[in-house]
């Protein structure tokens, strides 16, 4: 994110037979990826209760922009499921169609303070779409719960 | 979100619907859906048939692309799907044909307890189980298997737990494949998967996983029931869970590793979620090695959970485990790919049988069955929704001929999680269940709503269809007394 410049980004969930999908839109690819990662975190936990005290860097490379989204979100999920790290804020820099670097700021899960909402098994390729639409980027990603 | 099937679908008889191979480009075999007049409407609207047709395009597929009566939409493959590929004819293995929760499965334990004796204490027992068993999102188990220990657990499955004194030989014997798929390679499991699984062996997880205390309500087949150790009025305990984060990561890693494989082997796919590689290829072998390790982890997970249930029951009733008659009936894997020999066109062939939301249902006499069950056939464990019933069935010769020895795996969802929560809005699902005499405890605030009985197909109708199609025969129906969930 460029300092001082608030760009529009938005992510909402939609229904899917046994699972849940993320639908995101943003002005740039970096903002889109950040919106998806925040959407994923919102499915996992009540993000408003997570304090931004610990920082992690994630770098991902993939063969195309859709695979990049799956791999990036899988890293955010891994941080939680392996290390119990919950992200409060996510900023993505250097996003190209086949690589990105992101900074996750958050803290380790604390049963006393954090509310977990869903067990996310995986980020899937089903209905996967990441594309530029006019002046915007749009994405659809389905999560396996 | 699932789209209605627009291709051709023809009714064959009262229990089977065929999607002819010429109804979609690239289909190598017919699709065959086991269903009934009552169930087929939801099936056609539910997105399953399009996936059955897609799976029929996979290289090396033999017989038909099959769907069981609990079929519903899944990732790539439908849930309730069975597909067998011929290893020697460049048949493929696809992680999508197993699913993210590798060796999700069901274990059933019988007891000598009479449900009538339990009645007033059910709530106290369920509360005790809810305190003792690790359940819910982000909740790990009490066991830690470090380095070499985890490698041996992944390679050897329940046999390793027997050596450690954490399982009995008698448990291992009545676990599908003896609780270990040979050919598991811990080296094929990524560090990320090991990290996700590190603290999770012996924990239930969340979602649709549960431990249920049940009463055997009806016995249909007294001979098989006696061999299985089941009788009317008796208390049973059912455990439904899988390979936790370790298995989910193995599947994700494998899908990623296989993204480029279809291009390399000239395989055209209608859906990216169906990525695959020939069974005999290095990529296919690597997936199978990792998938088997995750399957072994899942069997150990259910074993450690059963150990905890046994301990809780013994303490709760102040009696020893043996005097309570706590004996495992069987343990089945319903998300797995296995190399099995089946007769195709009159010749025995080595096949890679994918069962995704389908249960192995081997016939009497099969050499892979434990001696105790060889005369009856394999116990087939079918969990239903938490308000209705679960079943024990037994495998048949018809299943060997028609479905590579497979039957259904449960009731099958009809409502999305969000729709289920909406349907439950303003209702207290726990109170509704209590009014039906069922004690339910869940960790998460939406768990009970998501898994409420209305979110599932009618398990009685699904089982009736399997029974009347002859794929497995009804042995016993169990009614839930109490359930714990994540």
Image: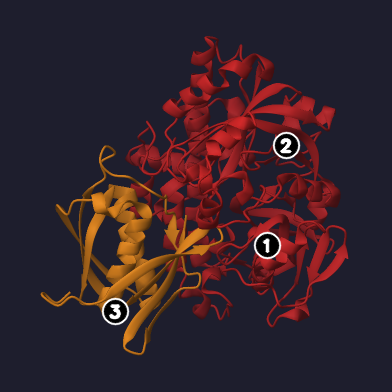
Chain colours: A orange, B red
In the image, taking residue B217 as reference, residue A95 lies left or right, namely left
Instruction: Judge the density around disc 1: few (<14), some (14-19), many (≥20) Cα neighbours within 10 Å.
Output: many
Evaluate whether label 1 is on the same chain as label 3: no
Tell me residue A61's x, y (percent): 30, 73
Q: Secondary structure at mark 1?
A: strand
**CA distance for labels 1 and 3:** 39 Å
The answer to whether A145 is drawn above or below residue B214 in the figure is below
Look at mark 2 in the image and give the residue it sits on: B392
> x, y (%) of residue B168?
55, 25
Q: Is residue B248 left or right of residue B212?
A: left
Q: Is residue B95 left or right of residue A103?
A: right
Is residue B164 shown to the viewer in this render? yes
Q: Residues within 10 Å of mark 3 (few under 14, many from 20)?
A: many
* Earlier sequence position, callout 2 versus callout 1: 1
Furthest residue toward right = B13
Answer with the quarter of the image where residue B375 lies.
top right
Identify the subunit bearing mark 2: B
Local SS, label 3: helix
At 62% from the left and 72% from the top, the residue drawn is: B3
Residue B24, label in figure: none
Name the quarter where the N terminus of chain B is drawn.
bottom right
Residue A37's spot in the image, x, y percent?
31, 64
In the depicted view, which residue is nearer to us: B474 or B58? B474
Q: Residue furthest left?
A: A4
Residue tagged 3: A29
Nearest to viewer (mark 1 / mark 3): 3
Residue at 69 percent of width and 37 percent of height: B389
Q: In whole angstroms, how far apart are the C-alphas of marks 2 and 3? A: 52 Å
Q: CA distance from mark 2 to mark 1?
A: 23 Å
**Residue B378 appears in the figure:** no
The residue that disc 1 covers is B83
């Amino acid at each position: 994110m460029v300092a001082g410049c608030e760009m529009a980004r938005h992510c909402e969930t939609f229904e899917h037979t046994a699972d849940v999908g993320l639908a995101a839109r943003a002005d740039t690819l970096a903002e889109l990826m950040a919106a998806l990662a925040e959407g994923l975190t919102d499915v996992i936990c009540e993000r408003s209760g997570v304090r931004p005290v610990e920082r992690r860097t994630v770098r991902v490379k993939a063969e195309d922009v859709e695979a990049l989204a799956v791999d990036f979100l899988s890293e955010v999920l891994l941080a939680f499921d392996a290390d119990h790290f919950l992200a409060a804020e996510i900023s993505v820099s250097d996003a190209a169609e086949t690589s990105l670097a992101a900074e996750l700021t958050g803290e380790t899960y604390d049963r006393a303070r954090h509310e977990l909402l869903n067990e996310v098994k995986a980020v899937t390729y089903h209905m996967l779409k990441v594309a530029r639409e006019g002046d915007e980027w749009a994405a659809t990603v389905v999560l396996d719960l | 979100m699932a789209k209605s099937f627009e291709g051709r679908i023809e009714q064959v008889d009262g229990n089977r619907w065929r999607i002819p191979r010429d109804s979609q480009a690239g289909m190598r075999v017919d699709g065959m859906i086991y269903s009934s007049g009552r169930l087929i409407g939801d099936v056609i609207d539910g997105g399953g048939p399009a996936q059955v047709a897609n799976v029929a395009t996979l290289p090396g597929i033999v017989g038909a692309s099959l769907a069981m009566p609990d079929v519903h939409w899944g990732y790539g493959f439908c849930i309730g799907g069975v597909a067998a590929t011929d290893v020697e004819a460049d048949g493929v293995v696809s992680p999508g044909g197993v699913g993210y929760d590798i060796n999700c499965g069901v274990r059933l334990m019988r007891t000598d307890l009479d449900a009538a004796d339990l009645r007033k204490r059910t709530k106290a027992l369920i509360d005790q189980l809810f305190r003792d068993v690790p359940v819910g999102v982000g909740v790990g188990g009490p066991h830690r298997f470090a380095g070499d220990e985890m490698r041996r657990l992944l390679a050897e499955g329940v046999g390793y737990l027997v050596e450690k004194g954490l399982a009995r030989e008698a448990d291992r014997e009545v676990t599908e494949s003896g609780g270990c798929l040979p050919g598991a390679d811990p080296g094929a499991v990524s560090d990320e998967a090991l990290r996700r699984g590190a603290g999770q062996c012996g924990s239930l997880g969340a979602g649709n996983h549960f431990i249920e205390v049940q009463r055997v309500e009806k016995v249909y087949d007294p001979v098989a029931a006696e061999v299985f150790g089941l009788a009317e009025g008796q208390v049973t305990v059912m455990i439904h869970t899988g390979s936790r984060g370790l298995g989910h990561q193995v599947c994700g890693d494998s899908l990623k590793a296989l993204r480029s494989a279809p291009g390399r082997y000239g395989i055209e796919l209608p859906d990216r979620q169906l990525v695959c590689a020939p069974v005999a290829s290095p990529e296919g072998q690597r997936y199978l090695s990792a998938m088997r390790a995750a399957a072994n982890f899942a069997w150990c997970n259910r074993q450690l959970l059963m150990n905890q249930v046994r301990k809780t029951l013994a303490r709760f009733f102040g009696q020893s485990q043996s005097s309570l008659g706590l004996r495992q009936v069987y343990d089945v894997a319903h998300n797995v790919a296995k190399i099995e020999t089946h007769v195709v066109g009159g010749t025995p062939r080595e096949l890679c049988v994918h069962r995704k939301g389908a249960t192995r249902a081997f016939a009497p006499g099969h050499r892979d069955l434990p001696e105790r069950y060889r005369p009856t056939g394999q116990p087939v464990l079918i969990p239903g929704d938490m308000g209705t019933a679960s079943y024990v069935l037994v495998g048949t010769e018809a299943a060997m001929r028609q479905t590579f020895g497979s039957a259904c795996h449960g009731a099958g969802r009809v409502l999305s999680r969000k729709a289920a929560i909406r349907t439950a809005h303003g209702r207290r699902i726990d109170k509704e269940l209590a009014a039906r005499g069922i004690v339910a405890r869940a960790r998460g605030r939406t768990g009970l709503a998501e898994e409420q009985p209305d979110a599932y197909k009618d398990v009685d109708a699904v089982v009736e269809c399997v029974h009347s199609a002859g794929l497995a025969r009804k042995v016993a129906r169990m009614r839930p007394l109490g359930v714990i969930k994540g």
